[in-house]
Image: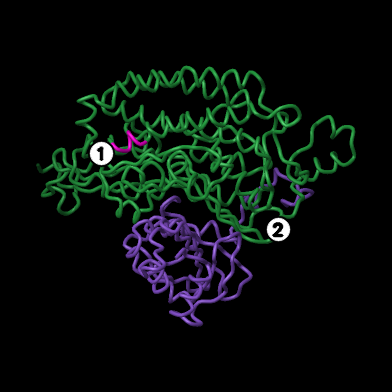
Chain colours: A purple, B green
Amino acid sequence: MALTNTYIQEKLVEKFNDQVFQFSTDSGILSFESAAENNLKVLQFLNEEPSLGFTFLTDLCGVNYPDNNGAELVVVYHLHNFIENIRIRFSIAVPVAKPDVFTATKLFESANWMERETYDFFGINFIGHPNLKRILNVDEMDYFPLRKEFPLEDQTRIDKDDEMFGRG
Amino acid sequence: MEQHSHITLPKGSIEKTTTTLNIGPTHPATHGVFQNIMEVDGERVVSTEQTVGYIHRAFEKLAERRPLYQITPITDRLNYCSSPINNMGWHITCERFLKIDLPKRVDYLRVIIMELSRISDHLICNSIVGVDTGAYTGFLYVMQYRELIYEIYEEVCGSRLTTNIGRIGGFERNFTNTAFTKLEKFLNEYPGVLREFEKLFTRNRIFMERTQGTGGISAARAMNYGFTGPNLRAAGVDYDVRVQQPYSSYQDFDFKVPVGTTGDNYDRFLVRNAEMWESISIIKQAYQKIQEFKGADAEIYHADVPEYYLPKKEDVYTKMEALIWHFKIIMGEIDLPKGQIYSAVEGGNGELGFYLISDGGRTPFRLHFRRPCFIYYQAFEELIKGGMLSDAVVTLSSLNLIAGELDA
């Protein structure tokens, strides 16, 4: 039986009931969310349940929604089942005040650097990560540059006056 | 020893039985700006720590303030050995997101350019593996033919390395006859060169002994480490984005996906060589399909999407509508639809993915690049542990690491 989005959704709901929510299919990929503390359980289920078989972690990245109170930081996982050739997107949200997420490195070796990158740019603390330190930025950096509060351009510059074009 | 009493060495540094060796950030063996701090016992590698980020340029942050068309030149600078694939991967992401359908001719033209850049990417990687095993000749020989590929880029888009080729919706101009003549020249000359290149290496005793059994990885470990592209296929998994999720009409072409068995340096080399042959065949098929377009169809090189595709310059001067679109595009005044998309293409060294989130603004709310070599470079320690230092150098080059892509 070919694996379909409907089947995956049923299987997840059957296992986790209301712990998984916000199902949608944006551009063909089934997306859903869960509470941050359940991320490992969900990932393990997706990985180890034989009828799902999402054994490949394609991508892991962070997103910052500064206006979502209590859920400012989001971690997005893209998983792939090579045999059925189907992708899935799974995300969890954590508050910026306490950005704690369990690490996926025990399930996927590939999560190691991707989590370090996410920590580096968003300051998400991956609990249990073997080597959680900055990877692309310098170690001395004391801010998380991909958070929306961090300005793209140096606000103290006075040689640029292009307010007309919305960069002011 | 009285006069040296002020020197304090770290505890245990005298008793240590291994040597710390620093390779990089700029070292001829790294072929890019990244550092390896290796612990070696004699010539055996005990452990290594990879440091990346020397040319980090914050592309993901930059992309949050740029309209879509201004992000294309950023993607050039990821894997700069095959920039056109990155450019087109980005255009394809935008087109999927904006639901733009492309004419077949544009798809085929793109396939030609993408396969040419796959050849130029693999060619560099394989010949560099040759250089690191002591065979410089092959490298110098095939470099001349990369030049032919770059001349085709130049004819199509005007630049060679950081190409910024194509636009959302198609190409900036039609291929000239010169471009096709140069393509024919390449198609005529390159197979012979590749055959000779293979003759130099594939059954070369020295090369085989240097590469066989070094830097190997099993299929299961490779998947766990997030390998994609030729490196994964060398381990025996036939995953190719061109086949699994065809883009740009790859389903219209007949080609094989070469796989290896052991995932070692030799298999990676063989897989890349085999892929170059497949690329040549794909280009030939695409060129043939393009020649079947006659009359007005042969003049199509972009889709009809005035919101994203710049109008002709003479129309901007003479037509109101064109002037408005020109202004709106250049000033980035077009609101994107809300939503998110993950779209991937088969890059030179693996699955190059773009994860785009839009909140309905004029620029992406968030753009994440899934850079294949950033993900598989993690496995480097496992690949070389316990092996010889000189094998580590070969493994490093056969992984096809590109510093620009590692650091984004």
Element marked by disc 1: helix
Q: Chain of mark 1?
A: B
Q: Chain of mark 2?
A: B
Element marked by disc 2: loop
Q: Is residue B171 magenta?
A: no
Q: Dividing the picture into quarters, in which one does residue B339 lie?
A: bottom right
Indicate which disc residue B355 carries: none
Of the pair B338 and B55, the residue shown nearer to us? B338
Identify the residue position indicated by label 2 in the image: B337
Magenta stretch: dominant secondary structure: helix
Q: Is residue A25 left or right of residue B302?
A: left
Residue furthest toward the bottom? A18
Q: Is residue B14 left or right of residue B284?
A: left
Alpha-carbon neighbours of circle 1 within 10 Å: few (<14), some, or many (≥20)?
many
Q: Quadrant of the N terminus of chain B?
A: top left
Q: CA distance from mark 2 to mark 1?
A: 47 Å
Residue flagged by tag 1: what amino acid is it? Ala
Q: Which residues are magenta?
A: B267-271
Identify the residue position indicated by label 1 in the image: B392
B60 lies above or below B323: below
Whether residue A143 is visible? no
- Percent x, y of residue B343: 55, 52
Residue flagged by tag 2: what amino acid is it? Pro
Q: Residue at x 60, y 61 (%)?
A: A148
Of the pair B269 and B359, the residue shown nearer to us? B269
Mark toward the start of the polypeptide (2 vs 1): 2
